[in-house]
Every structure is written in C-alpha cells, then in structure tokens.
Image (cartoon, rainbow, N blue to C red):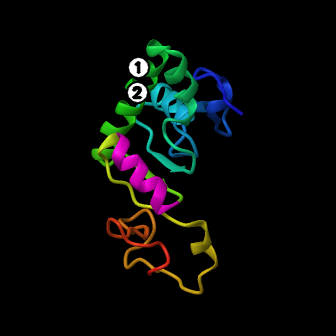
Amino acid sequence: LLMHPRDPRLLFHTEDGRAMKPDLVTLTNFVEAIQINRRFPRVPLVIFFGPPVMLVVAEDVVVGRPAIVDSYWQGVRGILRRAVAGEILIAAESLFRSEQFFWQTSVEVPFLRPMSVWVNATYSPRRPRFQGGEVLIHHKGRLKYETNF
C-alpha cells in the first residue's frame, strides 16, 4: 500500500490523543523510502530491498520521460546522503543486488540473505539494545560467491 506523504495514517496516536511521528520506519523499496524521507526527513529508516533500484523508472527511461527519472534520482540521492551520514540503513537481499546498487550509485551496501534467519547461529551484542548495541549484518567482500561464509 503506497500512501500519500501527508496521509494521517502515517502518524501514531498516543493514549492522550496526540499525533506523533514514528521513531523508525522500515521499508522494502525506494519509492516508499523517498516519500517517507520527504514526509519525515529526520526519522531513521531501514531499507531492505530486493528489486533493482532502477526498476520503478525503467519504463520512463525507455520511453524518454527524463523529468520523472530526474525526480526519482533526486529522491534517491537524498536517501543516499542520509545513509552515508549514518541516518539510514540500507541492505540488499543478495550479493548481486548489493553489487548492482554499488554500480548504479557508487555506494556500498551490505547484503543479508533471507536464509540467514534459519542458520543455527545467534548473535548477542555486548551492549543492551537501545544503549549502543550493534546489529550484525553479513557483508562479504567484493566479487566473492554467496555460498562461501
């Protein structure tokens, strides 16, 4: 469901009825990320993407609609600036997508295979959650096979 950036459903209501911005938003595509980034420019985002970053504007590129493509890339650049600053976490669903993203944007992102959920291993950060505890995301070196862990 793609919502308008001003949709009131994007706000959360407290028990006393106040509307509040979210503390964190998780997304799976860049169109939603662009809209949320415009609506909540200081809210941290986590983007876990599978489809290629250019997929949503591929037809616009082919038929020659540069204004749409330029607007999209402007939104992606805004997300990348915040990601480089550490305000947005972007992860790809595969090494291939991570490499494709790097080729298209010059920004390296880690990849996290969904099968990692079923691997019989756990990670326990040394610091408690929300007190500096880290998140472990598998990030392989460039040009290595995904089957080598």
Dominant secondary structure (helix, strand or loop) of the stretch shown in magenta: helix
Question: Which residue is most to the right?
Answer: 1
Q: From the image, which quarter does the C terminus lie in?
A: bottom left
Residue beneath disc 2: 73
Could you tell me which residue is drawn at 43 percent across and 62 percent down? 130
Could you tell me which residue is drawn at 49 percent across and 35 percent down? 54
Find the distance from the CA under tag 2 to the CA under tag 1: 5 Å
For label 1, the SS is helix
123 lies left or right of 28? left
Question: Which residue is most to the front?
Answer: 62
Magenta stretch, residue numbers: 94-104
Q: Callout 1 environment at 10 Å: few (<14), some (14 to 19), or many (20+)?
A: few
Residue 63 lies within the magenta run: no
Q: Nearer the viewer, residue 129 or 144?
A: 144
* Identity, as a three-letter code, of the amino acid under mark 2: Trp
Q: Is residue 63 above or below residue 95?
A: above
Q: Callout 2 environment at 10 Å: few (<14), some (14 to 19), or many (20+)?
A: some
For label 2, the SS is helix
* Image quadrant where residue 32 sits: top right
Q: Is residue 110 above or below residue 23?
A: below
Expressed as whole percent of the image width and height from the top left, the position of residue 98 reads 43, 55
- Image mark for residue 80: none
Q: Nearer the viewer, residue 130 or 57?
A: 57
CB under 8 Å between discs 2 and 1:
yes
Q: From the image, which quarter does the N terminus lie in?
A: top right
Expressed as whole percent of the image width and height from the top left, the position of residue 111 reads 46, 61
* Identity, as a three-letter code, of the amino acid under mark 1: Asp
Residue beneath disc 1: 70
* Image quadrant where residue 66 sits: top left
9 lies left or right of 85? right
Expressed as whole percent of the image width and height from the top left, the position of residue 26 reads 56, 47
